[in-house]
Image: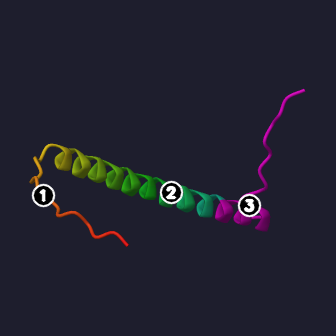
Amino acid sequence: MTNAIILPLPSSPERSRLLSVDLIRRRALDRLYRRRVAVEGLIRSLEEYEHARENVPGECISLPPAATW
């Protein structure tokens, strides 16, 4: 037994509906890929920021003792 995919005729409404569903899915997938790229860019920027902060020597300051209640 073979698993064949049978598409409706090109002029049928079912075919048109299938093509529109496919287009919707492709657009959604494209949006997901663009969001993924944006998130990866944000993560990379945060990692670079953290790395830059670790390499900058901080000033040593003395704090007076805090009053206790």
**Badge nearest the viewer, 2 or 3:** 2
Amino acid type for the residue under numbered disc 2: Leu
Q: Name the residue: 46% across, 53% down.
A: 33
Dot 3: within a 10 Å radius of its alpha carbon, few (fewer than 14), some, or many (20 or more) residues?
Answer: some
Residue 42 in the image: x percent, y percent? Answer: 33, 56
Type of the residue with mark 1: Ser
Mark 1 Cα-neighbour bin, 10 Å: few <14, some 14–19, many ≥20: few
Q: Relative to residue 45, is residue 4 depicted above or below?
A: above
Q: Nearer the viewer, residue 55 or 34?
A: 55
Residue on which disc 2 sits: 32
In the rendered view, tell whether residue 29 sits above or below residue 17. Answer: above
Badge 3 is on which residue?
15
Q: Badge 2: few (under 14), some or many (20 or more) residues near its Cα, within 10 Å?
A: few
Q: Residue 14: percent from the left, percent from the top? A: 78, 63
**Which is in the foreground here, disc 1 or disc 3?**
1
Q: Which residues are magenta?
A: 1-21
Which residue was labeled with disc 1? 62
Identified at 23% across, 52% down, the residue is 49
* Local secondary structure at mark 1: loop
| Corner quadrant of residue 24 | bottom right
Residue located 49% across and 57% down the image: 30
As shown in the figure, which amino acid type bears the numbered disc 3?
A: Arg
Q: Mark 1 vs mark 3: which is more N-terminal? A: 3
Label 3: which secondary element: helix
Q: Closer to the N terminus: mark 2 or mark 3?
A: 3
